[in-house]
Image (cartoon, rainbow, N blue to C red):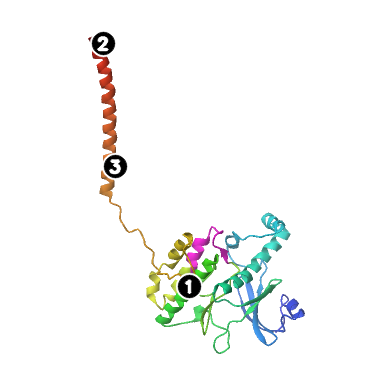
Amino acid sequence: MKIPKRIQPLVDDGLVDEVTSQLMSGKEASVYIVRCGETIRCAKVYKEASQRSFKKASAYREGRKVRNSRRARAMEKGSGFGREQQEKVWQNAEVDALYKLAEAGVRVPSPYGCFDGVLLMELITDDEGYVAPRLNDVTMSAEQAVEDHDVMMGYIVKMLCVGLIHGDLSEFNVLVDEYGPVIIDLPQAVDASANNNAEWMLTRDVNNIRDYYSQFAPELSKTEYAKEMWALYEKGELTPEIELTGKVQENTVEADLAAIMQEIDAARNEERFRQERLKEAKDGVDESKFNWSEN
């Protein structure tokens, strides 16, 4: 096929030998299957900001830090240079997350570098060598659903342990090869400790995955892994090896209204009694003075 304009520089530099086909076009990027020597990989071409349809991008960028102070100031001001730098940060976020998560033991495509808005990475295939299907195209037994759901919860825990939340995780951002789930699409990954939206993004990620697998294993719909993960994370007790239960100890003790009202009445009576004693003491002093003068 014709080489896309954005990939041409990689061909010129010998990083890509051939573009064989377009794999998909999404809200933030287009993905192509490419040949690099004897290896088949994929090239993710990020769309320009004006062409992206990803909603609420600012919510995902919150907390991302830039070491270069000049770049940071430009990004805050929203100048042309600042917008250009913001795009680079957005694009590099995915390759940085891929390296970080692979090291943490999360199954993600292996990255081979990001070159001017084009991310070269591993092409995930099935056992027959075809492009691996997305999770939303896969059906499974209840037993397999429970097993893969457990794997995914483990991956999300490992992500959180290195300070990352996917931010847009669902059955559409997970591939399934012969070894199980592989998490993809990470340019919007958020810093769990610096983003004010971190907790609800984690909850949405976890619940999206839970809801999909619960179609095959209904008992999963009652689990509360997001609450459990976040509670442990906030207490500094979350570790990659932790065994989660999917349950959260809720405070189920109902308020005893009668007892509360009794305490309120007792407090009122005590205060009334105290005021009466004060009044009696004051009156008693006055009366003693009056009686003394009479004598």
Name the amino acid type tagged 2: Ser
Q: Left or right: where does residue 195 sit relative to residue 13?
A: left
Is there CB contact under 8 Å for labels 2 and 3? no
Dot 1: within a 10 Å radius of its alpha carbon, few (fewer than 14), some, or many (20 or more) residues? some
In this rendering, position of residue 197 left or right of residue 118? left
Choose the circle earlier in sequence order: 2 or 3.
Answer: 3
- Give the numbered dot on residue 293: 2
Q: Residues within 10 Å of mark 3 (few under 14, many from 20)?
A: few
Q: What is the distance, in whole Å, between disc 1 and disc 3 at their CAs?
A: 49 Å
255 to 48, vertically: above or below: above
Q: Is residue 230 visible?
A: yes
Q: Nearer the viewer, mark 1 or mark 2?
A: 2
Q: Is there a contact, CB below 8 Å, between mark 1 and mark 2?
A: no
Query: Of callouts 1 and 3, which one flags the residue occurring earlier in the amino acid sequence?
Result: 1
Q: Callout 3: helix, strand or loop? A: helix
- Point 43% across, 81% down: residue: 144
Q: Quadrant of the N terminus?
A: bottom right
Q: Check contact, mark 1 vs mark 3: CB within 8 A.
A: no
| Residue at image location 48% in from the left, 66% down from the top | 204
Say whether residue 194 is magenta: yes
Residue 251 screen position, x and y as percent:
35, 58
Residue at (48%, 82%) from the top-left corner? 138
Q: From mark 2 to mark 3, how far is it between C-alphas?
A: 44 Å
In percent of width and height, residue 285 lies at 27, 20
Q: Amino acid at mark 1?
A: Gly
Between label 1 and label 3, give the one nearer the viewer.
1
Residue under label 3, please give it: 264
Q: Which residues are magenta?
A: 189-205
